[in-house]
Image (cartoon, coloured by chain):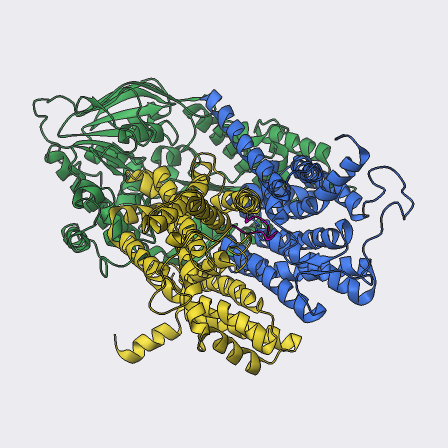
Chain colours: A blue, B yellow, C green
């Protein structure tokens, strides 16, 4: 097995993209100090709406737009109680993750008439970059949302460090009282990033159901939203480090896929991304601890 | 308190308002997608409590209550255990393996697998404790991350080393007769798991309110710095609470496997969604442990009734997940509104 | 016309009347001191002026016009700037970013860093507030951080600059430099409101003084025409406090609390305590003075066992036990931090620490726990509806009395009290003092940390001064505030 085949790298990128998009949303929230663990539910909801709208209109791009709009609405269910009313964001997120699971499974049966997995020749997925004329290895079979995700990493890194609004967001997350003391509208920022995270999760969901594959199946987010949460924890709110963390997951998933091809049981492939993500989290924490102990 | 005053307090209490609100919103969802609530709700009730169904509802109450304890016990110490599925599967597979591989005399053949299940679940959950207390990785994240590999491992064991030969179905062979949980009375569903879990719930309630450990767990959950200052070994308390929760989950898995159909069928433990039904029930009880059995009963009725509703009225049973999710959100909102009014 | 006026301002927090019909007027270019003891209502008043709290009654005028200040943003717009006691700075941002934030110079959609640095440098130059614009604030010494806050206010063109206890964290040299800066600033026409409880500062820099006591104005003076005695009178309502009767020193028994050569480093390797030695004997109160952050926290956490098993700390001759040494009664500074669990009942809060002694094996004797709590509630005159209500339902003073009830009834011969009267009213304060004195008379060794020198002088038999993690001086209990204050700022006596 050659890990350095183009197809392996392509697989890594495909696996990374939805997680990265969701994680960018989580990072944005983290910048302002909102611990957003509703990414999983939003990702699933986005994936579902993308398929429904694409199926209805015959346009994958309409599906993407629908997913973004619908997931922004969904994220308002987090932002209004958690930011506006200051309810416990963790409990709200647990509820919303469950709600997304139930809502997608329920509506799927109502709309498509059956549960499990929906795919159909009528359902249009996102075009490959190859079809759009970008016929280079690795990218050839990716959807346009993949380079968009990578570009967003650069945009967000630059924006957060260079722009006025980026500076203010970072400041608001560092010290709440200080932000209020210099007159920054912290609550508005928090609503804003929560809704923006919804938009990014909408993109992530569309990439998952119309980019990576062209179908919807129940619970297809399969923990990717949680991996995104971990990636945010690993990132130290730095977009480039976030990309690395997400790539780590992508490698794990692509590798697990390969292992399965090599005859290892599917369960090993299922578990691999989680084991590797958890290991990364533990190693990072141990490293931080060691560093502070060396000082002591 | 007078009877009307008591009645008024119950009616406006958070759980009642939350359930009412969630049902109202769910009815709205029904109307939007064109489901007739006047057909769906009666079907739901019949699905849960009509003859024959009631027994099944009671049987489903057992693991749901077990999983409620699995979530509630760590929550009292301030730790979110969302990894119930992994702990459940680990407990189930440990119990099945022991019962299949080790010939045991009667009674012991039931007791040991139950203990093994509890131990396995407790171990899986306890991993999260040092991660939380020493490395500051929130349990809500670590328990979830550990859950999927644990489920995968159980699934692997059931499909390969422990698989029933020749059938091609992902399940273990039937467990030896000695390992079957005895039925309760003349029931064909309800086993002695019911009294067992009820007694354990009683013990937990007693421990929570009336023992030193319970007090220290609550103090740790309320304000960790306060507990540490008071001399409580908070790291150990958090570990005990998480392991204890995991043990309840593992026991629930073992109870499922040792009950009909007396085998570990891959996916059968996690598919009914006991874990999150239990999470919703515990959050619905809003920090009043005594109410937990009631909220578990309510949500079990909803969950089981949902399947009846699907059979009878053709309404997808996932509707009950929507209700659960809404309940959690509404409970959280009510909690802050109440706290604000008190100030 | 005054630059700023507070007219009949009233603010109530629950049962506490923090500000009661206060009038305060500040002229252009004057340094106006607002003095009063802790809890007199100074900080609340300044928070109202800066839009952080809204008054229940009364109004605020700027240049004669009534203004509504709903938020700091409003206040900034109306030319107000504030330097908070706890700095409101962003540790991860640079000095320049901290100064310009909220009104950043922008070029082509990006922050114009060069312009920001230039403007900050110009302001620094003009007012003698030296600070490197590109340095990260998190790594700066306290004195420089304060300059950053002042620069920020000046950058936003504040016409009224509020400083809340600005010298609490400064060394004497830094304080002198700050006062120079304030004079320069005032000379440009900016009004300065200086909140303090140090009379020497008022006399040194103030033009006029408003004195608050228990939420009311009890005096208005022009510094040139008054003296410290007059101010003290207005501040505490009586001429110089008669010290509590100090016991004739008994023959010294061996110390119950002994610290020998204690050195402690923090996670970054900085020494927080250096070779600290002290001893507290039965029947004496040893006061601990020092500006905030001089090592008090580390010392107290070491003595109580909360820092783990630290070498060099001995209780009755044996090393301190890690976790929480049950031989020490400890009244912590912050009631919401570690002293109470707000959601638990009064009885459960009072139980903490005694749960294992009261219980046989596993079971908690609920009835006995409640009986004991009711007993203590009566004995310590805690006003609570019942012992079953959450402790958060109690007023601050009553919650503090509950903490004292819990700690002082421990079977311990060492009592550590940290700011025991912070944020409580005068009645509770007297009660707390009486309790500590009674503990002393019963033979307890008391270590009392307080930022109020008057409190230390009232209670302590000896006063130790911590400065940068070292014990730099020891005074008898009746030493003057000036001497103690000087030692607190590191000046060698």
Residue B39 location, quadrant = bottom right
Q: Say which residue appears at 25% left-offset and 46% top-offset.
A: B212
Give whichever of B198, C120 is nearer the camera: B198
Location of residue B150 in the rendering, given as x and y in whole percent from the top left corner: 52, 44
Residue A198's place in the image compared with A277, above or below, is below
In what quadrant of the picture does the C terminus of chain A appear? top left
The span shown in magenta is B164-172
Q: Is residue C217 magenta?
A: no
Query: Of all residues shown, which one is farthest toward the bottom?
Result: B38
- Does B50 sit left or right of A83 as displayed? left
Q: Say which residue appears at 16% left-offset and 23% top-offset.
A: C255
Give whichever of C135, A254 is nearer the camera: A254
Give whichever of C254, A73 is nearer the camera: A73
Query: Of all residues shown, which one is farthest toward the front?
Result: B166
Whether residue B23 is visible to the viewer of this picture, yes or no, is: yes
In what quadrant of the picture does the N terminus of chain A appear? top right
Location of residue C456 in the rendering, given as x and y in whole percent from the top left corner: 24, 33
- Does B85 sit left or right of C249 as displayed? right
**Magenta stretch: dominant secondary structure:** loop
Residue A6's place in the image compared with A65, above or below, is above
Location of residue B263 in the rendering, given as x and y in whole percent from the top left corner: 48, 54
Residue B13's place in the image compared with C66, above or below, is below
């Amino acid at each position: 097995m050659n890990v350095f085949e183009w197809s392996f790298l392509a697989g890594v990128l495909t696996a990374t993209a939805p997680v990265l998009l969701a994680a960018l949303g989580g990072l944005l929230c983290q910048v302002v100090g909102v611990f957003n663990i509703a990414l999983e539910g939003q990702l699933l909801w986005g994936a579902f709406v993308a398929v429904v709208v694409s199926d209805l209109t015959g346009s994958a791009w309409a599906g993407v737009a629908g997913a973004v709009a619908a997931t922004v609405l969904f994220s308002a269910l987090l932002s209004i109680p958690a930011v506006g009313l200051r309810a416990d964001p963790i409990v709200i997120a647990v509820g919303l993750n469950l709600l997304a699971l139930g809502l997608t499974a329920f509506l799927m049966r109502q709309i498509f008439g059956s549960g499990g997995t929906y795919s159909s020749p009528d359902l249009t997925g996102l075009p490959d970059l190859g079809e759009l004329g970008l016929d280079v290895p690795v990218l050839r079979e990716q959807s346009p949302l993949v380079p968009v995700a990578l570009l967003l990493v650069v945009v967000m890194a630059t924006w957060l460090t260079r722009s006025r609004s980026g500076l203010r967001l970072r400041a608001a997350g560092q010290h709440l009282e200080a932000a209020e003391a210099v007159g920054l509208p912290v609550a508005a920022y928090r609503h804003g990033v929560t809704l923006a995270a919804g938009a990014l999760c909408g993109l992530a969901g569309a990439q998952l159901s119309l980019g990576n594959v062209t179908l919807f199946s129940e619970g297809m987010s399969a923990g990717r939203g949680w991996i995104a949460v971990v990636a945010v924890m690993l990132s130290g709110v730095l977009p480039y480090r976030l990309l690395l963390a997400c790539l780590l997951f992508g490698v794990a998933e692509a590798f697990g896929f390969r292992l399965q091809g090599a005859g290892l049981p599917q369960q090993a492939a299922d578990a691999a991304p989680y084991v590797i993500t958890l290991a990364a989290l533990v190693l990072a924490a141990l490293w931080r601890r060691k560093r502070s102990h060396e000082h002591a | 308190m007078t009877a009307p005053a008591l009645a008024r307090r119950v009616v406006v209490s958070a759980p009642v308002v939350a359930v009412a609100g969630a049902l109202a919103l769910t009815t709205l969802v029904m109307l939007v997608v064109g489901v007739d609530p006047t057909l769906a709700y009666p079907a739901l009730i019949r699905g849960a409590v009509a003859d024959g169904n009631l027994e099944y509802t009671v049987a489903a109450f057992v693991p749901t209550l077990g999983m409620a304890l699995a979530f509630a016990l760590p929550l009292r110490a301030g730790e979110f255990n969302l990894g119930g599925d992994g702990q459940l599967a680990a407990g189930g597979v440990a119990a099945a393996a022991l019962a299949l591989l080790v010939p045991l005399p009667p009674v012991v053949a039931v007791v040991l697998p139950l203990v093994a299940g509890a131990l396995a679940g407790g171990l899986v959950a306890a991993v999260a404790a040092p991660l939380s207390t020493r490395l500051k990785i929130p349990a809500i994240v670590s328990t979830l991350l550990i859950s999927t590999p644990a489920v995968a491992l159980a699934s692997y064991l059931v499909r390969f080393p422990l698989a029933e030969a020749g059938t091609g179905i992902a399940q273990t062979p039937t467990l030896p007769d000695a390992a079957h949980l005895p039925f309760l009375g003349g029931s064909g569903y309800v086993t002695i798991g019911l009294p067992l879990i009820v007694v354990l719930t009683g013990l937990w309630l007693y421990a929570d309110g009336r023992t030193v450990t319970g007090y220290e767990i609550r103090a740790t959950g309320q304000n960790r710095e306060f507990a540490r200052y008071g001399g409580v070994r908070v790291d150990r308390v958090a570990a005990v609470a998480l392991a204890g929760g995991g043990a309840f989950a593992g026991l629930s898995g073992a109870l499922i496997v040792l009950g009909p159909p007396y085998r570990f069928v891959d996916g059968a433990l996690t598919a009914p969604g006991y874990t999150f039904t239990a999470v919703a029930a515990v959050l619905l009880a809003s920090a009043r442990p005594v109410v937990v059995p009631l909220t578990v009963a309510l949500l079990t009725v909803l969950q089981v009734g949902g399947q009846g509703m699907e059979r009878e009225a053709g309404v997808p049973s996932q509707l009950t997940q929507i209700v659960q999710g809404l309940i959690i959100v509404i409970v959280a909102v009510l909690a802050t509104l109440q706290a604000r009014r008190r100030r | 016309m005054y630059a700023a006026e507070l007219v009949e301002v009233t603010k109530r927090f629950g049962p506490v009347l923090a500000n009661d019909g206060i009038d305060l007027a500040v002229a252009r270019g004057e340094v106006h001191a607002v003095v009063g003891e802790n809890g007199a209502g100074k900080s609340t008043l300044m928070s109202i002026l800066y839009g952080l709290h809204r008054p229940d009654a009364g109004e605020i005028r700027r240049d004669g016009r009534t203004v509504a200040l709903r938020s700091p943003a409003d206040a900034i717009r109306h030319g107000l700037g504030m330097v908070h006691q706890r700095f409101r700075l962003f540790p991860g941002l640079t000095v320049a970013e901290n100064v310009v934030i909220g009104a950043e110079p922008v070029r082509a959609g990006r922050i114009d860093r060069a312009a920001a640095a230039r403007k900050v440098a110009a302001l620094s130059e003009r007012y003698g507030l030296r600070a490197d614009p590109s340095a990260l604030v998190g790594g700066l010494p306290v004195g420089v951080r304060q300059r950053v806050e002042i620069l920020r206010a000046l950058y936003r063109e504040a016409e009224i600059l509020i400083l809340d206890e600005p010298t609490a964290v400064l060394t004497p040299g830094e304080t002198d430099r700050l006062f120079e800066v304030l004079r320069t600033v005032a000379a440009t026409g900016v009004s300065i409101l200086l909140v303090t409880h140090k009379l020497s500062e008022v006399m040194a820099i103030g033009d006029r003084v408003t004195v608050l006591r228990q939420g009311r104005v009890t005096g208005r003076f022009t510094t040139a025409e008054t003296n410290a005695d007059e101010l003290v009178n207005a501040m505490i309502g009586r001429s110089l406090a008669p010290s509590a009767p100090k016991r004739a020193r008994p023959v010294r028994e061996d110390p119950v609390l002994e610290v020998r050569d204690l050195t402690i480093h923090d996670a970054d390797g900085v020494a927080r305590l250096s070779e600290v030695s002290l001893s507290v004997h039965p029947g004496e109160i040893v006061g601990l003075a020092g500006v905030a952050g001089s090592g008090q926290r580390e010392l107290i956490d070491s003595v109580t066992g909360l820092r783990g098993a630290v070498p060099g700390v001995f209780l009755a001759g044996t090393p301190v036990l890690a976790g929480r040494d049950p031989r020490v009664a400890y009244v912590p500074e912050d009631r919401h931090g570690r002293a109470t669990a707000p959601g638990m009942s009064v009885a459960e809060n009072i139980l903490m620490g005694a749960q294992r002694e009261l219980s046989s094996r596993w079971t908690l004797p609920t009835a006995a726990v409640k009986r004991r709590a009711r007993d203590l509630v009566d004995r310590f005159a805690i006003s609570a509806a019942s012992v079953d209500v959450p402790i958060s339902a109690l007023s601050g003073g009553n919650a503090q009395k509950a903490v004292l009830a819990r700690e002082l009834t421990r079977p311990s011969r060492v009592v550590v009290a940290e700011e025991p009267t912070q944020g409580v009213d005068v009645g509770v304060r007297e009660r707390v003092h009486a309790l500590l004195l009674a503990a002393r008379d019963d033979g307890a060794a008391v270590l009392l940390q307080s930022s109020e020198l008057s409190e230390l002088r009232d209670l302590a038999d000896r006063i130790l001064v911590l400065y940068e993690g070292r014990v730099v001086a020891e005074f008898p209990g009746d030493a003057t505030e000036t001497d103690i204050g000087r030692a607190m700022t590191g000046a060698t006596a």
